Amino acid sequence: MSGAPVDVATGPVEAISFLPDGRLFVASSDDGRATLWNPRTHKRLADAFPEEEGSVPVARFTARGDLVIENVRNTSRWPIDPESRRCARHALPALQRRIAGR
């Protein structure tokens, strides 16, 4: 996209996926919505897809152009080492201790 940013959600955006030909993109966000957009006009093309209460949608296009929306109830975020671009596995024991309150 070029020009001004597109305000696609009221909460943090979890994923953005473009159609293989770039004509559309779908944005999924923590506000429980997945919305379809035209990147050239910055216009939302339809109302948000139905949401599943208590879940976060993760929307993506397949290589064939099919839209897939998965509703996730639990998510985990893992720290990534910026230099190696690998999951910082050494952080896992400390994270587990912090979660357990030790």
Image: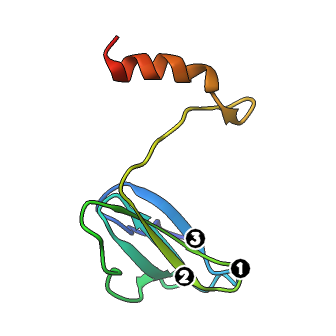
The residue that mark 1 highlights is 63
Tell me the tag on residue 67. 2
What is the distance, in whole Å, between disc 3 and disc 1 at their CAs?
11 Å
Kind of residue sitting beneath label 3: Ser
Q: Counting other residues with Cα less than 10 Å from the Cα at mark 1, is it few (<14), some (14-19), or many (20 or more)? A: few
Residue pictured at 38% horizontal, 67% vertical: 7
Residue at the far left: name it.
53
Tell me the tag on residue 13. none
What is the distance, in whole Å, between disc 1 and disc 2 at their CAs?
10 Å
- Location of the N terminus by quadrant is bottom right
**Label 2: which secondary element:** strand
CB under 8 Å between discs 1 and 2: no
Q: Counting other residues with Cα less than 10 Å from the Cα at mark 3, is it few (<14), some (14-19), or many (20 or more)? A: some
Is 82 situated above or below 38? above
Side of 40 where 10 appears, left or right: left
Residue at the far front: name it.
100
Quadrant in the picture for residue 17: bottom right
Q: Earlier in the sequence, mark 2 or mark 3?
A: 3
Kind of residue sitting beneath label 1: Ala
Q: Nearer the viewer, residue 87 or 1?
A: 87
Kind of residue sitting beneath label 2: Leu
- Location of the C terminus by quadrant is top left
The residue that mark 3 highlights is 17
Residue pictured at 26% horizontal, 60% vertical: 54
Q: Which x, y percent locates residue 71?
A: 40, 66
Comparing labels 3 and 1, the label whose residue is closer to the camera: 1
Residue pictured at 38% horizontal, 50% vertical: 74
Residue pictured at 70% horizontal, 80% vertical: 20
Q: Which x, y percent locates residue 25?
A: 54, 77
CB under 8 Å between discs 2 and 3: no
